[in-house]
């Protein structure tokens, strides 16, 4: 049987075109609907994130408010706190020198008689007398042991003229500190320096049996006066220089008849270094 | 245009173009703005979360409580120190403040320090305290300072080592804040030592000077020459009257 299509060709083509157009229209609609749905879902997500961000930002503002309140509370008393700290520092500073002098007295050999002691905050300078070089040597050895107190100990002549002095080995110099030159090639702690001391001391005038000398000790922890941040206050003390020793010795020292007191060194009341061959006080290891 | 003239390829091209255009349009009009907004909100969240969380809020509340406690403690300690060591000087009102300062220097500070310097634990106490010059105008810059420093002079005393050291430390018990100006100098042979040290007095006014006073107007109104009994209007250092209490014997 023969099938004969009597319809015109255009009818079939129109159907195809219509179907194709419908397919694209469907696809277009799907794209639009899908885009809208996806966009709405994203908007919901973004809105949720916005809500969270606003909540967290509100909490952040609360925290910042608390922090600024705390800072404000502390700021109101900051000036008082500075004054309070300064007052405490002054009270502490007033006790620094007595503590220092007491510490020096602790390390002082008992047969040494101090005739003056002063400090500029960075160094302690003492003039003293001893009866013989043995006592002087023991005294110097004691001072060299005070490494927790001093970084350098040097002995100077009381007499005028050149004060270029002999220094015996002992406390090593601090890095960056003043140059330290041992009197002998021997290492720190060597007793060979004692011999050199004889060139640096002088016999006390009028007292042939006594040796007068001065010792300068560089402090490991310099003492500086407190300063206040406010106006009208100039920091004092420190290495700016103390009063030196004006009037420290009105006339010649009054040496007791018959030599120094046998009961102890110049400044009693504090534990003293034992005399004679007994073990000397030890500074911290190092 | 009649549909009959379109061929299938035309429909495909047009349909594809429309689909692509719709997709691109949807992306840029709907999706991308939401994505950008989401990223922006997420960034805000992340930035705010550093502080905006419960732990930080609790910590901030604790810090605030501690700040109140610390401020309270500081205030109390400050009040104690001020009561113990400072005069009640308020320069907010300059005229009253100046009178207060005069009273403090002449009637309190000078006798107090001289009296306190007399230490029974040592001998031969010698003080050479010099009180500051009294300001003659309430507009003096003295009243604008946070802190007033008075170099008093030096103290010397005799005794043994321990008593002299105690004499130095004793200034911490004075009812004014007195500070060593430099290191004490020891001289002599124990137990007959002599110590010499300069001191200075430090005073914190409760309030600095307020608004300056128009002195020209005051002068036009009659110019009060000074309150009766007030110290002379001079910049010379204050000299206490002879025989003032508390003045230790001179050298």
Image (spheres, coloured by chain):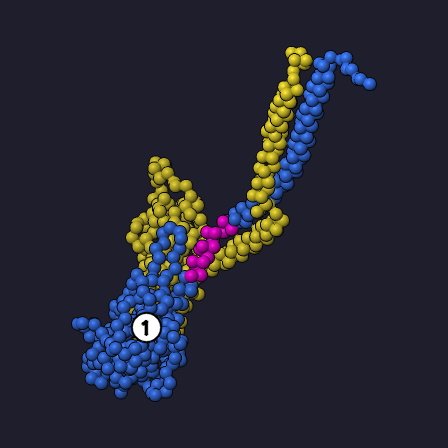
Chain colours: A blue, B yellow
User: Which secondary structure, mark 1?
Assistant: loop
Percent of width and height locating residue A222: 35, 66
Q: Nearer the viewer, residue B74 or B42?
A: B42
Q: Chain of mark 1?
A: A
Residue at 32% across / 50% down in the picture? Answer: B232
Asked if residue A231 can be seen in this view, the reply is yes
Q: Quadrant of the C terminus of chain A?
A: bottom left
Residue at the image position 53 percent from the left and 53 percent from the top: B71
Tell me which secondary structure the magenta stretch mostly adopts. helix
Q: In the displayed image of the protein, which residue is found farthest to the right? A: A1
Q: Between residue A245 and residue B101, name the one nearer to us.
A: A245
| Residue range of the region highlighted in magenta in the rendering | A74-89
Q: Which quadrant holds residue B129?
A: bottom left
Instruction: Give how far across and how far down residue B105 sits, in percent.
Output: 38, 55
- Vertical arrangement, residue A249 with respect to residue B9, above or below: below
**Picture quadrant where residue A279 is located:** bottom left
User: Residue at image x 65%, y 35%?
Assistant: A42
Q: Residue B189, can we see it?
A: no
Q: Which residue matches tag 1?
A: A172
């Amino acid at each position: 049987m023969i099938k004969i299509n009597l319809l015109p060709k255009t009818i079939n083509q129109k159907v195809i075109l219509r179907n194709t157009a419908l397919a694209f229209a469907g696809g277009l609609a799907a794209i639009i609907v899908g885009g809208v749905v996806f966009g709405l879902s994203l908007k919901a997500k973004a809105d949720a994130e916005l809500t969270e961000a606003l909540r967290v930002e509100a909490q952040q503002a609360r925290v910042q408010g608390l922090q600024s309140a705390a800072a404000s509370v502390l700021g109101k008393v900051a000036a008082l706190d500075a004054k309070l700290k300064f007052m405490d520092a002054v009270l502490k500073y007033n006790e620094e020198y007595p503590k220092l002098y007491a510490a020096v007295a602790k390390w002082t050999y008992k047969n040494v008689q101090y005739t003056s002691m002063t400090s500029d905050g960075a160094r302690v300078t003492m003039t003293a007398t001893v009866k013989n070089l043995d006592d002087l040597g023991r005294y110097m050895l004691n001072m060299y042991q005070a490494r927790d107190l001093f970084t350098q100990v040097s002995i100077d002549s009381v007499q005028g003229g050149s004060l270029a002095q002999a220094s015996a080995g002992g406390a090593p110099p601090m890095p960056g500190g003043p140059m330290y030159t041992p009197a002998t090639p021997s290492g720190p702690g060597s007793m060979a320096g004692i011999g050199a001391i004889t060139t640096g001391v002088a016999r006390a005038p009028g007292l042939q049996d006594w040796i007068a000398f001065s010792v300068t000790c560089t402090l490991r922890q310099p003492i500086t006066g407190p300063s206040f941040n406010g106006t009208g206050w100039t920091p004092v003390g420190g290495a700016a220089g103390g009063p030196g020793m004006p009037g420290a010795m009105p006339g010649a020292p009054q040496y007791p008849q018959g030599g120094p007191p046998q009961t102890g060194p110049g400044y009693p009341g504090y534990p003293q270094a034992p005399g004679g061959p007994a073990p000397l006080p030890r500074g911290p290891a190092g | 245009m009649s549909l009959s003239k379109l061929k299938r390829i035309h429909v495909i091209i047009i349909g594809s173009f429309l689909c692509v255009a719709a997709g691109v349009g949807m992306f840029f009009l709907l999706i991308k703005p939401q994505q950008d907004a989401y990223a922006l909100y997420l960034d805000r969240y992340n930035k705010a979360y550093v502080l905006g969380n419960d732990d930080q809020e609790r910590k901030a509340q604790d810090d605030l409580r501690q700040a109140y406690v610390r401020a309270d403690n500081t205030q109390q300690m400050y009040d104690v120190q001020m009561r113990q060591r400072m005069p009640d000087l308020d320069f907010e009102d300059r005229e009253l403040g100046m009178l207060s300062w005069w009273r403090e220097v002449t009637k309190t500070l000078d006798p107090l320090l001289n009296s306190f310097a007399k230490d029974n634990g040592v001998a031969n106490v010698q003080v050479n305290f010099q009180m500051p010059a009294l300001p003659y105008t309430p507009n003096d810059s003295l009243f604008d300072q946070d802190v007033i420093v008075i170099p008093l002079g030096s103290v010397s005393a005799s005794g043994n080592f321990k008593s002299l050291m105690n004499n130095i430390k004793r200034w911490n018990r004075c009812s004014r804040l007195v500070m060593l100006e430099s290191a004490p100098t020891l001289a002599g042979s124990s137990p007959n030592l002599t110590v010499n040290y300069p001191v200075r007095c430090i005073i914190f006014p409760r309030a600095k000077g307020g608004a300056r006073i128009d002195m020209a107007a005051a002068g036009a109104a009659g110019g009060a020459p000074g309150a009766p009994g007030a110290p002379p209007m001079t910049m010379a250092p204050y000299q206490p009257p002879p025989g003032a209490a508390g003045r230790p014997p001179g050298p």
